[in-house]
């Protein structure tokens, strides 16, 4: 097929780019600064070098308009909080004393001051820091970061577009500050916030910005008429300013739906829309509002969140349709490329045939440039690229990696009974109490213990051949012995082996399952300086042999107390991987669930009485629109039960979730039918305990009393007070005591002190309980 050139040259652009650098230079510099090994000036110099390198790479690749302002030392929503002056009162002194240290105090907390709450950015695995607002919040503009980064790009002679979180999304992401009534709605502060945005826009225009992008992804969610009216008012006012750049309103992660007419009618110059998620509906909606006459449309036709190559012909067809719906059409990824690794060409251990299927940030940038060229000059000008793309797509579709008949046959034979425990919870609970003999308010941890430098060195030594497998395993055994001994001495009731052999809670399993691919350099930011390497779910899944039984059994041999078996659940295995896009997610989840079911059965046979199957991603993968959620929750909860339902009644099944808003999925948590669930609760002051109680949740729960994402050590009394709050919602016979999440990222000194305080708090509160 040959397409005609577009009437106007299509520009290639992106909304954001990976921040860390090719060797995670930003992570190393920031963490070095925290430890006092890197000066503030050196940290700023590293950051400036990374930004300049990114700008040059984008320009050299053919990106016509580069984004600025997307870089962050920690989180772009926290950067917005600084930009609008919404500093929490408890952090004001630190920010005034030193802006950089105060910034990190808001992100991480200090021993004396709690950080901002952290939660997931829509349905991604990126975490943002939640703004805290109240009726007394006063906003003040601070555009220094945004202006400086724009000037960096302009100094290189580049066309640059600053990217900001939009005012409506910022307020919809916020929560009431501590001490503010829970029913306070931050969106009521919109009229107070808009003049600050107006000032920032004026500053950016004065600095040379022709366009500024305002991101409003919150508008792809279900929104009330009042919220849509707020968006109308916001962009009527900002669009009506005389001293401003041109405005590009951007949304992503789903279709805009009822918000599209609002933004289409706004007095702004352009819209940027996602045409990879619900693309057909987005196209229909855009046609229904009469298109965008006189406006610029930036079409997100390259998936910004997954790592598979684009179907260039399909995207060109979409772009061709869009040409008749806007004044000009430009080409982009569907969202910031923050959510994908930097460069697939750095992967040396992936089979070249499979590597052809993958597109990381640099490859996606090339796809965008190719599509813009084809749209501008016609498909004849990119004939070679189209032919290579078709061949790569066909190679993937026909590969035996993507289709294992035995796996598909087993999955097709699953029945409803396979996903149901043999006895109801009340009968199981009695059997488990008799079998385990635990006290009221039993203490445990979530699974991982600190990953020390010695452990990382041992893994590196094994890879480099400096030690053999036997030597490596002796180091792992020594770490397990230390972890078990510490837990016993501290008085923890249900132990873990600490997971010293695991590099990551998903990658570790992915490396032992067929159908998964591991990367060496595929780092993606999860939060702050925490980077993960999501494995690639490329084909049908099976488990060739046991994955965890050996180390769990070894730990159990060291103690008379129960040691939990630790597994990652099927939904999280999907959510924290780059999942295949050639079959329904529910089908893939069932394959993973069956592999995990085999592992659960082997753990039980080996004598493991408590098995935890973590599902922290259950909430984050929840579709953004309510109409799409029931179908997702049906297959997601079935996959968990399929993993766990084959055990005896006296085997206790735990699950764990962290850093998400749980209120939307309380019924789904119930539907998992786990015997015990542990959840993040420390930063939210036991909110989830109240949500479980309001739902009438009948099983055991451990809302966390120790915030592990902060280096501060909570006192025993602080943990005890959280427990007392939890007891107001959950009776003592069903309340567990545990941290919010795993301890992998913490150091041993703070871990020891925090867990000792946690156990002391449990003992104190036990003594306060009435005797029967």
Image (tube, helix red, strand yellow):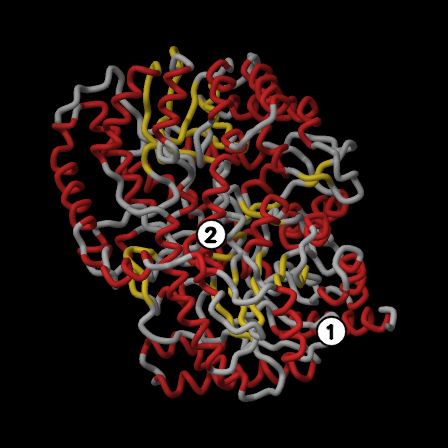
Residue 768, percent across and down? 86, 69
Q: Earlier in the sequence, mark 2 or mark 1?
A: 2
Q: Position of residue 315 (x, y in %)?
A: 26, 31
Viewport quadrant of the N terminus: top left
Label 2 secondary element: helix
Residue mark closest to the camera, 2 vs 1: 2
Q: Is 404 displayed left or right of 307 in the figure?
A: left
Question: Along the line of sight, which residue is nearer the eye, 463 or 175?
Answer: 175
At x 44%, y 21%, the residue is 210
Crowding near the residue tagged with mark 2, few <14, some 14–19, many ≥20 C-alpha atoms within 10 Å: many
Q: Residue at x 49, y 75 (%)?
A: 500
Percent x, y of residue 722: 77, 59
Assign a secondary structure to mark 1: helix
How many numbered discs? Answer: 2
Task: Give the side of residue 38 with respect to residue 531, left or right.
Answer: right
Q: Are marks 2 and 1 in contact (CB under 8 Å)?
A: no
For residue 477, the mark is: none
- Label at residue 636: 2
Q: Nearer the viewer, residue 186 or 664?
A: 664
* Vertical order, 414 against 78 (above or below): below
Q: Which residue is under mark 1? A: 759
Residue 701 lies, with reference to residue 561, above or below; the image says: above
Residue 42 visible in rendering: no
**CA separation, marks 2 and 1?**
34 Å
Query: Residue 385 location in percent, x, y?
Result: 16, 38
Nearest to the observer: residue 113 or residue 1: 1
Classify the position of the C terminus by image quarter.
bottom right
Quarter-wise, where is residue 333 in the image? top left
**Left or right, residue 286 beside residue 320:** right
| Dot 1 crowding, Cα within 10 Å, few <14, some 14–19, many 20+ | many
For the question of whether residue 125 can be seen, the reply is yes
The residue under the point 15% across, 32% down is: 382
């Amino acid at each position: 097929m040959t397409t005609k050139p577009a009437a106007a040259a299509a520009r290639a652009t992106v909304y954001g780019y990976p921040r860390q650098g090719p060797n995670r230079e930003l992570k190393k510099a920031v963490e070095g600064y925290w430890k006092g090994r890197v000066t503030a000036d050196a940290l700023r110099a590293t950051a400036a070098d990374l930004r300049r390198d990114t700008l040059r790479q984008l320009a050299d690749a053919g990106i016509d308009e580069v984004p600025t302002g997307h870089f962050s030392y920690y989180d772009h929503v926290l950067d917005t909080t600084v930009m609008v002056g919404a500093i929490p009162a408890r952090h004001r002194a630190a920010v005034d004393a030193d802006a950089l240290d105060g910034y990190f105090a808001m992100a991480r907390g200090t021993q004396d001051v709690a950080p901002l709450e952290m939660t997931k950015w829509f349905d991604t695995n990126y975490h943002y820091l939640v703004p805290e607002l109240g009726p007394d919040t006063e906003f003040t503009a601070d555009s220094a970061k945004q202006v400086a980064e724009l000037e960096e790009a302009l100094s290189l002679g580049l066309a640059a577009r600053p990217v900001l979180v939009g005012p409506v999304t910022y307020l919809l992401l916020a929560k009431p500050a501590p001490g503010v009534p829970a029913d306070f709605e931050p969106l009521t502060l919109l009229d107070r916030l808009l003049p600050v945005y107006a000032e920032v826009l004026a500053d950016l225009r004065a600095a040379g910005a022709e366009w500024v992008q305002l991101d409003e992804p919150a508008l792809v969610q279900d929104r009330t008429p009042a919220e849509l009216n707020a968006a109308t008012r916001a962009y009527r006012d900002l669009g009506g300013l005389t001293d401003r750049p041109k405005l590009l309103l951007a949304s992503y992660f789903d279709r805009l739906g009822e918000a599209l007419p609002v933004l289409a009618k706004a007095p702004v110059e352009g819209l940027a829309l996602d045409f990879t998620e619900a693309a057909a509906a987005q196209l229909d909606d855009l046609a229904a509002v009469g298109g965008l006459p006189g406006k610029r449309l930036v079409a997100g036709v390259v998936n910004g969140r997954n790592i598979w190559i684009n179907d260039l012909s399909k995207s060109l067809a979409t772009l061709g349709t869009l040409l008749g719906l806007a004044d000009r059409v430009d080409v982009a990824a569907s969202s910031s490329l923050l959510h994908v690794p930097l460069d697939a060409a750095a992967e040396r251990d992936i089979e070249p045939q499979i590597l052809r299927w993958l597109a990381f940030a640099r490859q996606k940038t090339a796809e965008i440039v190719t599509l813009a060229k084809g749209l501008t000059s016609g498909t004849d000008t990119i004939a070679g690229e189209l032919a290579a793309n078709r061949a790569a797509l066909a190679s993937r579709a026909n590969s035996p990696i993507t289709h294992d008949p035995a796996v598909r046959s087993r999955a097709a034979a699953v029945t409803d009974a396979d996903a149901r425990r043999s006895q109801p919870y009340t009968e199981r609970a009695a059997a488990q109490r008799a079998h385990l003999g635990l006290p009221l308010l039993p203490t445990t941890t979530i699974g991982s213990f600190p990953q020390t430098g010695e452990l990382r060195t041992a893994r590196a030594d094994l890879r480099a051949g400096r030690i053999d497998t036997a030597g490596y395993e002796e180091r792992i055994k020594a770490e397990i012995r230390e972890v078990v001994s510490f837990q016993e001495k501290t008085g923890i009731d249900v132990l873990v082996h600490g997971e010293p052999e695991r590099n990551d809670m998903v990658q570790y399993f992915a490396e032992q399952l067929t159908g998964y691919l591991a990367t060496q350099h595929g780092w993606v930011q999860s939060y702050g300086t925490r980077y993960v390497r999501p494995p690639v779910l490329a084909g049908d899944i099976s488990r060739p042999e046991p994955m965890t039984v050996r180390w769990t059994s070894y730990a159990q041999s060291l103690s008379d107390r129960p040691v939990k078996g630790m597994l990652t659940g099927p939904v999280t295995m999907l959510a924290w991987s780059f999942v295949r896009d050639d079959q329904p997610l529910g089908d893939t989840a069932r394959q993973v669930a069956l592999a995990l079911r085999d592992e659960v059965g082997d753990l039980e046979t080996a004598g493991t009485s408590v098995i935890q199957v973590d599902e922290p991603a259950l909430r984050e993968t929840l579709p953004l629109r309510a109409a799409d959620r029931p179908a997702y929750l049906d297959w997601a909860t079935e996959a968990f039960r399929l993993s766990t339902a084959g055990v005896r009644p006296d085997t206790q099944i735990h699950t764990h979730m962290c850093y998400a808003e749980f209120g939307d999925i309380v019924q789904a948590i119930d539907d998992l039918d786990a015997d015990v669930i542990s959840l993040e609760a420390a930063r939210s002051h036991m909110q989830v305990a109240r949500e479980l109680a309001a739902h009438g949740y009948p099983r055991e729960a451990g809302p966390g009393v120790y915030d592990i994402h902060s280096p501060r050590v909570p006192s025993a009394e602080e943990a005890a007070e959280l427990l007392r709050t939890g007891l107001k919602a959950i009776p003592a016979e069903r309340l567990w005591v545990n941290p919010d999440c795993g301890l992998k990222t913490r150091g041993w000194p703070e871990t020891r002190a925090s867990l000792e305080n946690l156990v002391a708090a449990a003992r104190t509160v036990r003594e306060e309980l009435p005797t029967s």
